[in-house]
């Protein structure tokens, strides 16, 4: 089934859609895995094994907030550094008359 007017599109449109779906699924899995890793790490770091109160106290809340922000900040910096190295490697490879 095509979403283009007059029945255009064909199998190439379906291939593109399937590729997009696969990429979105991989991205969703990566984001979900990262989220669970952050939750697990920050929970272990900030929440004591014996619960005293039913709600987070101020110290636990601040700890979780800082932990989450630090995790995101470090992950972003690592991603930027890897992207820069990838660009530099690509520039070197392209600089040899290829």
Image (cartoon, rainbow, N blue to C red):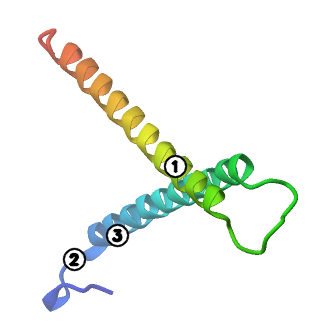
Circle 1 Cα neighbour tier, 10 Å, few/some/many (<14 / 14–19 / ≥20): some
Q: Position of residue 69 (x, y in %)?
A: 46, 49
Q: Give the residue pinned by disc 2.
A: 9
Between disc 3 and disc 2, whose residue precedes?
2
State the separation of the CA atoms marked 1 and 2.
Answer: 49 Å
Between disc 1 and disc 2, whose residue precedes?
2
Q: Give the residue pinned by disc 3.
A: 17
30 or 63: which is nearer to us? Answer: 63
Q: Furthest-bottom residue in view?
A: 6
In the rendered view, tell whether residue 53 sits above or below residue 98.
Answer: below
At x 20% / y 88%, what residue is drawn? 7
Q: Where is residue 58 in the image (x, y as percent from the top left)?
A: 61, 62
Image quadrant occupied by the N terminus: bottom left
Observer-side mark, 3 or 2, equals 3
Observer-side mark, 1 or 3, equals 1
Q: Is residue 56 left or right of residue 70?
A: right
At x 18% / y 81%, what residue is drawn? 8
38 or 28: which is nearer to us? Answer: 38
- Residue 66 is marked as 1
Q: Furthest-right residue in view?
A: 50
Q: Furthest-top residue in view?
A: 96
Number of marks in the image? 3
């Amino acid at each position: 089934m095509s979403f283009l007017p007059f029945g255009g599109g064909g199998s190439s449109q379906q291939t593109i859609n399937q590729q997009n779906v696969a990429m979105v699924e991989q991205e969703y899995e990566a984001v979900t895995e990262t989220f669970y890793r952050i939750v697990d790490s920050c929970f272990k770091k900030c929440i004591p094994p014996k619960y005293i109160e039913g709600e987070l106290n101020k110290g636990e809340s601040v700890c979780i907030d800082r932990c989450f922000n630090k995790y995101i900040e470090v992950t972003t910096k690592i991603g930027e550094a890897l992207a820069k190295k990838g660009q530099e490697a690509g520039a070197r490879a392209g600089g040899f008359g290829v």
